[in-house]
Image (cartoon, rainbow, N blue to C red):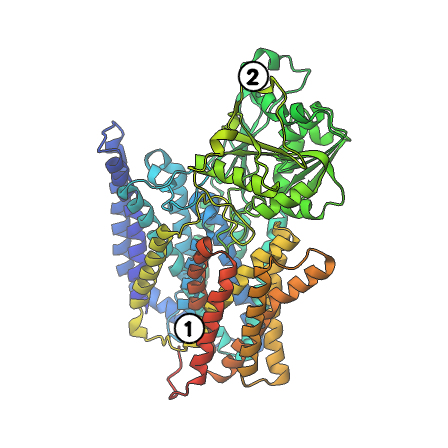
Amino acid sequence: MTRAFLRLVGLAFLGAGLVPVVTVTCDRWSARHAFSPGLLFELGGSAAVVFAAVRFWAVLKKVEGRVDAHAREQADFLSAFPPRYADLAIFGAALLSLLLELAVIRWQGTVFEFFAFYKNFSLLCCFAGLGLGYALAGSDRMPLGLTIPLLGGQFALLVGLRFGLAPWLSCLTILPFREQLTMGLPSARTLSQAIAIYFFLSVVFLSTVLAFVPVGQLCGRLMERREKLRAYGLNLLGSLAGVALMSILSWLWTPPLVWFALCFLGTLLFYSRRPLSLLMGMGCATAALVILAWPVTPLWKRIYSPYQLLELSEGPRGLMVMRAAGHYYQRVHDLARSNHNVELDPELRHIRDYYELPYRIYGKPKEVAIVGAGTGNDVAAALRSGAEHVDAIEIDPAILMAGQANHPERPYQDPRVQAIVNDARSFLRNAGTTYDMVIYGLLDSHTLLSHAASVRLDSYVYTVQGLREARARLKPGGVLSLSFSVISDELGRKLYLMMQDAFDGRPPVSVRAGYDGSVIFLQARDTDLVLPAGVLQESGFQDRSSFYANAALQADVSTDDWPFFYMPRRIYPLSYLVMVGLTALLLFFVTANFFAERPQFSQLPFFLLGAGFMLVETKGITELGLVFGNSWQVIGIVIAGILVMAFLANCVVQWLRIRRSLLPYVLLLASLVLGWLVAGRGGLPSTLLGRLETIVLLTCPIFFSGIVFSTLVAARGRIAGIMAVNLLGAMGGGLLEYNSMYFGFRALYLIAMVLYAVAFVWDLVPREPKRSMG
């Protein structure tokens, strides 16, 4: 195994060295071979990186014997692990694997924007590595000592590319997918651009998988030390602790340095006790943490909020500018009446007119709700316009705090303002008051709702149902104002249609303001909104209502079942199939290198159960987040609750000594059918009873699938091999989740039903006993 593993490690480092060469070449090709004085520097630097990677491969061959000895020693150390500590070790290894998985997913998204918008890719990498590691748990080699160096190498690669060679590697900031629009990031338009990004993703996939293989081996080997159901229960408890620990770290706004320091400490605790191994591990961990701590953007203050990486700096006129996911996000303005520069500066006058336009249309409001309040520009505009009370809702506490500390007009310190940290959709649904005006700030996300779904953080704010709930918060005669940076005409048409649908077919007034590419959509609660005479002429804005009313602009509205707001049209994501194919090909390539170890990938039901569980989990996260709010706390509690249900199912199987899976299968399929039927009727009411019923409806499939899984675990094969197939099945479920981008989330029920039904039928067919996995 060691030789195959080192061969892949060398290939990963060679690929890392080729990334700059491939990217520079593709950049030049897409620019039609344009020459610049920096071209020789680019190629020379890339050649040096490739040379270093080739030399590293040569070094690997020389040290293969030592690495093999350490890998054998590591496996022997875990085999001789004292039995009295086995339970604690299983728990700790599962905690380590989950914490490391969440840390890698979050960190990759802070370096390259692609991973922030498509966390599913990072999740699939982790699943592939852990699954293969479980399959190889019985090997007499365990290269755990290479996990930290592999992660350190990935740190160096991604940080070096993003911040060291950024001016020459523009292809790596281009998304390969065309179906979804993305703020600040263009999509690949040429074959050469797609080649560059997919080659880069292949290298990241390979390095991440290899880093997680020893961790999966660690978990699987330790689980073999205990009875199967007990080992699985301890694994679930450790995973639950990993989720809880990451939630605490998010709550404390800790940076990746802290996340990975804890992960590396946990890894070192499982090292063999030879001083040389420990010293090398600590040295590699220190080097990796130094790379993470390197001040790559010294002029920007970095804040790791529970949702994303925010960067603060001083912009024009000495005021704060904020970036998210590496791109411009927000900036504050001093538009106070006492600031005489506003009247002298046409740009500032234009910005002030943009923020105050809704109030010039409505008049002087008493009660105002602002969702997506951000750093306070919209709040300050409401106060300047005479609002008597303002509820300012912002989901990210770090953004709110930055506004409180840095906005020159101090809107959040005004006694008329109540700052609320909450999800906009949840607030609008549950607010106990009504307002004269509901204002949507420039509310857009630069990250996904969770690592398990392809829905963005703000997607459920921009659905027809969400806009209807906002309308319900208006007083008679109240006005809703929605501003958005419209990055395509089709997206503007989509917002126009959604507003029209939410207001009983009455089309909104659409005003292009120009500030940050924004268009303002306005509508009154009960009557058609009419713009006062002269408002647009005074501000220089343009009425775009007739333009977006043009049926030739094709767009599909977002709903709670299909909340893909950044997809103007409901089309099948064909470009995602390239990612699916690439992932499957890479997984086959990595697995093929270990065929000599003969891991047995049979037990099809466990694969299907893993895929079905992933789909049901994704549906549960999105639906429960929609009901209770899509804040990070709620999503963390939901994920923890899913693990708790799986643990309780495991306990029930042990307590009641369930040995047959027929009844659990029937209950599982029945709960999925019920969920599908309820989803088709628009879900349950948002009353207290309705919420409790929603919890039961969404967790029952998880509970019954857990009973099925634990029942089969008790009767079949080795636990490490079962976990391997189950994790690879979860990876398959993650790929199937992309179908929701066309069919909607309700369709996940149907896909899960098919998977579970096939598993059920497969179990009914008698077959000869097969050699267990390992």
SS at mark 1 in the image: loop
SS at mark 2 in the image: helix
Check the image and report above or below for 552 versus 265: above
Residue at (42% x, 73% y) in the render: 137
Q: Which label number is shown at residue 332? A: none
Residue at (60% x, 59% y) in the render: 681
Callout 1 amino acid? Ala
| Residue identifier under label 1 | 137
Q: Position of residue 747 (x, y in %)?
A: 49, 61
Residue nearest the observer in this picture, 544 or 195: 544
Q: Quadrant of residue 383?
A: top right
Mark 1 vs mark 2: in front: 2
Res. 500 visible in picture: yes
Q: Position of residue 307 (x, y in %)?
A: 56, 46
Residue at (39% x, 67% y) in the render: 132
Quick one: label 1, few (<14), some, or many (20+) residues within 10 Å? Answer: many
> Is disc 1 in contact with disc 2, using a CB cutoff of under 8 Å?
no
| Residue identifier under label 2 | 537
Check the image and report above or below for 176 versus 760: above
Quick one: label 2, few (<14), some, or many (20+) residues within 10 Å? Answer: few
Residue at (66% x, 31% y) in the render: 405
Q: Position of residue 671 (x, y in %)?
A: 58, 71
Q: Is residue 437 left or right of residue 232?
A: right
Q: Earlier in the sequence, mark 1 or mark 2?
A: 1
